C-alpha cells in the first residue's frame, strides 16, 4: 500500500468513526482541501499540493513529548538572546501558555510546567458544533485577559487558526507574545505581527 493509499484509508476510517472533516484535517495535519480530496477522489481532479507530517512516534511517547517541549523552550529563548528576532527581554516575557486544541495541548501543558506559567486552552472555531462557529478559551483552565501569552500548536498547515487565536487574544485583552510550533509548512514568519518560532520548516519542491 502506498503512502497516499494509507492516507486515504486513514481519512475514510476517521470519517466512519464520526470525525468531521475539520477534525480529520487536524488529525492528519493536512489542509481541508486535501482532506476533501482524499475523501471524495473526484475523477481527474488534481491532488492539492500538501505535505503529510506523521510525528506519532513522538506524540505517543510522554518522555519524547517532554523533550520536544524543552526544545521549543530552548529554541525561543536562544533566538531572543541571540537577537534573531527584534524583541527585548521584557517584551519576550510571558506568563501564560495557550495550547491550541487538540495537538497543542500536551506540549503547552509541559511548557507551562517548565516555565512556571499559567495554562490556557483554546478551542478553534472549526471544532465548534454550533451553527455559527466561534473559537473560545476553555473556562476550565486559565483566563487570558491582561496576560502575556505564548501560543503553542504542532503544525502550521494554512495559518488560519493562528490568525483566529491572535485576534481572539487581542480582543479579550491579552498580549500575544509569540507562536511556537513544531512544523511550519507555510514558512510563516509572523502572524499579524506576532513572531513564529518553528522547530522545523517543511518545504515542498515541485
Image (cartoon, rainbow, N blue to C red):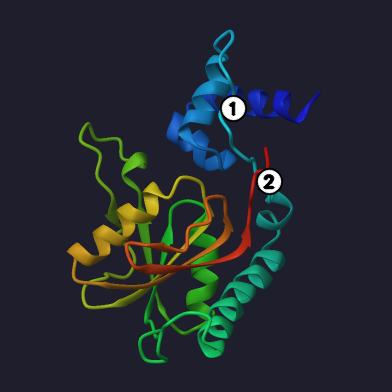
Q: Which tag, 2 or 1, sits closer to the chain's start?
A: 1
Residue beneath the point at 64% across and 49% down: 203
9 sits left or right of 179 in the view: right
| Picture disc at residue 54 | 2
In front: 92, or 117? Answer: 92
Marks counted in the figure total: 2
Residue 134 percent across, percent down from the top left = 24, 45
In front: 130, or 171? Answer: 171
State which quarter of the image contains the C terminus.
Answer: top right
Residue 27 percent across, percent down from the top left = 55, 41
| Neighbour tally class for label 1: few under 14, some 14-19, many 20 plus, Cα within 10 Å | many
For label 1, the SS is: helix
For label 2, the SS is: loop
Residue beneath the point at 64% across and 61% down: 200
Q: Is residue 16 visible?
A: no
185 sits left or right of 68 in the view: left
Residue 98 percent across, percent down from the top left = 39, 66
Q: How far is mark 2 from mark 1, CA to CA?
A: 14 Å
Q: Is residue 119 visible?
A: yes
95 sits left or right of 139 in the view: right
Residue 35 percent across, percent down from the top left = 53, 28
| Picture disc at residue 11 | 1
In the figure, 133 relative to 62: above or below?
A: above
In the figure, 148 relative to 187: above or below?
A: below
Amino acid at each position: 500500500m502506498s503512502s497516499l493509499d494509507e492516507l486515504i484509508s486513514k481519512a475514510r476510517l476517521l470519517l466512519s468513526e464520526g470525525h468531521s472533516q475539520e477534525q480529520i484535517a487536524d488529525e492528519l495535519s493536512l489542509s481541508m482541501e486535501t482532506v476533501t480530496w482524499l475523501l471524495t477522489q473526484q475523477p481527474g481532479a488534481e491532488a492539492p499540493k500538501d505535505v503529510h507530517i506523521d510525528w506519532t512516534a513522538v506524540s505517543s511517547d510522554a518522555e519524547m513529548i517532554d523533550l520536544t517541549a524543552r526544545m521549543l523552550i530552548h529554541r525561543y529563548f536562544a533566538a531572543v538572546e541571540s537577537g534573531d528576532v527584534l524583541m527585548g527581554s521584557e517584551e519576550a516575557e510571558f506568563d501564560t501558555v495557550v495550547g491550541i486544541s487538540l495537538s497543542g495541548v500536551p506540549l503547552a501543558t509541559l511548557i507551562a510546567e517548565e516555565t512556571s506559567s499559567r495554562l490556557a486552552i483554546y478551542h478553534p472555531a472549526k471544532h465548534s458544533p454550533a451553527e455559527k462557529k466561534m473559537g473560545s478559551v476553555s473556562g476550565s483552565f486559565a483566563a487570558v485577559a491582561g496576560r502575556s501569552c505564548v501560543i503553542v500548536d504542532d503544525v502550521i498547515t494554512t495559518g488560519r487558526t493562528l490568525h483566529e487565536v491572535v485576534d481572539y487574544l487581542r480582543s479579550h485583552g491579552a498580549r500575544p507574545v509569540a507562536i511556537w510550533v513544531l512544523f511550519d509548512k507555510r514558512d510563516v514568519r509572523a502572524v499579524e505581527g506576532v513572531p513564529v518560532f518553528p522547530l522545523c520548516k517543511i518545504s515542498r519542491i515541485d
